[in-house]
């Protein structure tokens, strides 16, 4: 059983341990969920390597990093899948994956595929003033939101960032009262109303099942 | 009072302007407001105070942001300080008839509430002598077109932060084409997930990766537009 450290997933990702014949190259923010699905389903032939989750703070670097690892690893595997959605790359990641001949996750970002891309899209007309957090992002709220936005040093900037938002939606992948409490605190710190929404693994589970069938 | 505290009123004009660049860089709004008032009291033309002190200072901030030396929080603080100076200068600029570069209508697209980049662009465009009509966030195609009709600007600027909302820019441009008005305006687009390829694909005139680029692009396109022969 792999022990995960969220700070390491954020800063360094997860190194590859070679054992299977299919490689999943993923965002570090998805490591817990991917490994949980692998264990639940007994998909032992799926290897996982994660890039640092904090690449999301510089989305223009994601495509090049994904390409670098895919090119380096593809010869060792029967199949390689990229477990990123568009993630702010403006279609560049999708174009690169097509060029490399590898599949990636559908949808704009993890908030969408955890909720289910179709459902998320249907809500987009009415819910665009929501700020989303997942399990990982609740745990890493300070590393991904508070500190990079400078709110630890300049709390007065909060309303410049979040003044147009109305609520924080915590998309829960697991039922964890401690995370629920922490997410509520995140909402309070941002001055937003709070809503908890259990999503489970959403489309990620469906996509991984497809990948596991290779 | 600390021994090394700088008394703005004791600085020469040149020293004061350089100090304003530093204070903008550090996001010191009150100091910027005090310095702007000092320059005006010393007989500076409002346009000179704007361009030589505020815009020049923000240009340094913009360059360091682009080079990865400064980050969004610092840029926001600098912008907030510049806003304080602009608030003093704006009525004076109107009263003194400062040079006009052109007019821009700008807004964030439908379904998108992110306005930090748009606000920065609007402020830097004003600093560069453009008249800016800011439509705010969540703008439908109708709202953009109504504003173009009412304001008759040279430039339409559209902003989006989300992969899911940036395609709406194409909806606006396609509607402009349908109504035969696309070529009447320079269309500039920007926002974190955008890039040159996207800008070309949707039929915009240019993608602007940051506020400084937006200003330079706007100036170049307006100059080109004004130099275009009447055919």
Image: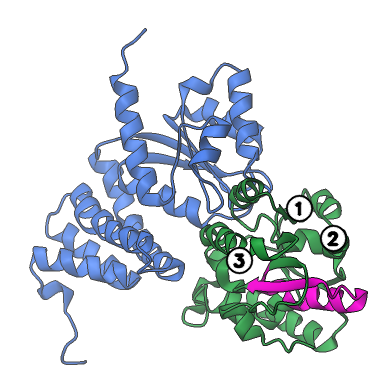
Chain colours: A green, B blue
Q: Which mark is residue A106?
A: 1
Q: Nearer the viewer, residue A51 or B165?
A: A51
Whether residue B101 is situated above or below residue A73 in the rendered picture: above
Residue A121 place in picture, x, y as percent: 80, 50
- Considering depth in this image, is B92 or A191 the residue closer to the camera? A191
Please, which residue is most extreme toward the right here?
A: A41
| Res A83 → quadrant | bottom right
Going by the picture, which residue comes out furthest to the bottom? Answer: B2
Q: Which residue is mark 2?
A: A203
In the picture, the quarter occupied by the N terminus of chain A is: bottom right
Q: Looking at the image, which residue is at 24% across and 70% down?
A: B22
Q: Earlier in the sequence, mark 3 or mark 1?
A: 1
Q: Do residues under tags 2 and 3 come within 8 Å of each other at their CB atoms?
A: no
Q: Which residues are magenta?
A: A26-50
Number of callouts: 3
Q: Residue furthest left?
A: B12
> Could you say which disc has been placed on residue A162 in the image?
3
Q: Are marks 2 and 1 in contact (CB under 8 Å)?
A: yes
Seen in the image, is A4 located left or right of residue B86?
right
Mark 3–mark 1 Cα distance, whole angstroms, equals 27 Å
Q: Is residue A49 magenta?
A: yes
Q: Nearer the viewer, residue B201 or A181?
A: B201
Q: What distance separates the C-alpha of mark 2 from that of mark 1? A: 9 Å
- Which residue is at 37% across, 63% downward? B65
């Amino acid at each position: 059983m792999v022990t995960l450290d969220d700070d390491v997933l954020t800063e360094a990702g997860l190194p590859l341990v070679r054992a299977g014949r299919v490689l999943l190259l993923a965002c570090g923010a998805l490591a817990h969920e991917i490994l949980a699905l692998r264990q639940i389903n007994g998909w032992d032939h799926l290897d996982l390597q994660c890039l640092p989750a904090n690449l999301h703070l510089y989305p223009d670097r994601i495509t090049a990093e994904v390409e670098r690892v895919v090119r380096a690893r593809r010869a060792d595997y029967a199949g390689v899948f990229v477990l990123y959605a568009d993630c702010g790359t403006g279609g560049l990641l999708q174009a690169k994956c097509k060029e490399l001949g590898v599949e990636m996750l559908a949808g704009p970002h993890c908030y969408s595929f955890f909720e289910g891309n179709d459902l998320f899209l249907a809500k987009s007309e009415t819910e665009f003033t929501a700020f989303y957090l997942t399990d990982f992002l609740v745990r890493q709220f300070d590393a991904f939101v508070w500190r990079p936005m400078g709110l630890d040093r300049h709390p007065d900037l909060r309303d410049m960032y979040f003044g147009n938002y109305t609520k924080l939606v915590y998309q829960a992948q697991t039922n964890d009262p401690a995370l629920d409490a922490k997410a509520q605190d995140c909402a309070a710190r941002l001055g937003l109303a709070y809503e908890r929404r259990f999503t489970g693994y959403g489309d990620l589970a469906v996509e991984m099942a497809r990948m596991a069938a290779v | 009072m600390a021994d090394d505290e700088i008394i703005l009123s004791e600085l020469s004009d040149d020293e004061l302007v350089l100090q304003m660049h530093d204070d903008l860089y550090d996001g010191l709004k009150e100091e910027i407001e005090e310095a702007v008032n000092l320059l005006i009291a010393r007989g500076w033309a409002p346009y000179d105070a704007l361009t030589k002190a505020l815009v020049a200072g923000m240009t340094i901030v913009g360059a360091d942001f682009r080079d990865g030396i400064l980050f969004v929080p610092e840029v926001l603080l600098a912008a907030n300080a510049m806003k304080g100076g602009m608030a003093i200068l704006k009525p004076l600029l109107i009263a003194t008839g400062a040079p006009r570069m052109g007019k821009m209508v700008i807004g964030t697209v439908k379904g998108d509430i992110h306005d930090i980049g748009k606000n920065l662009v609007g402020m830097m465009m004003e600093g560069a002598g453009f008249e800016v009509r800011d439509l705010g966030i969540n703008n439908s195609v109708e709202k953009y077109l109504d504003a173009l009709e009412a304001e008759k600007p040279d430039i339409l600027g559209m902003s989006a932060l989300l992969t899911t909302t940036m395609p709406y820019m194409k909806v606006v441009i396609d509607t402009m084409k349908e109504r035969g008005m696309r070529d009447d305006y320079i269309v500039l687009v920007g926002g974190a997930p955008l890039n040159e390829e996207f800008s070309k694909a949707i039929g915009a005139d240019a993608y602007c990766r940051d506020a400084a680029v937006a200003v330079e692009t706007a100036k170049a396109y307006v100059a080109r537009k004004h130099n275009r022969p009447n055919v």
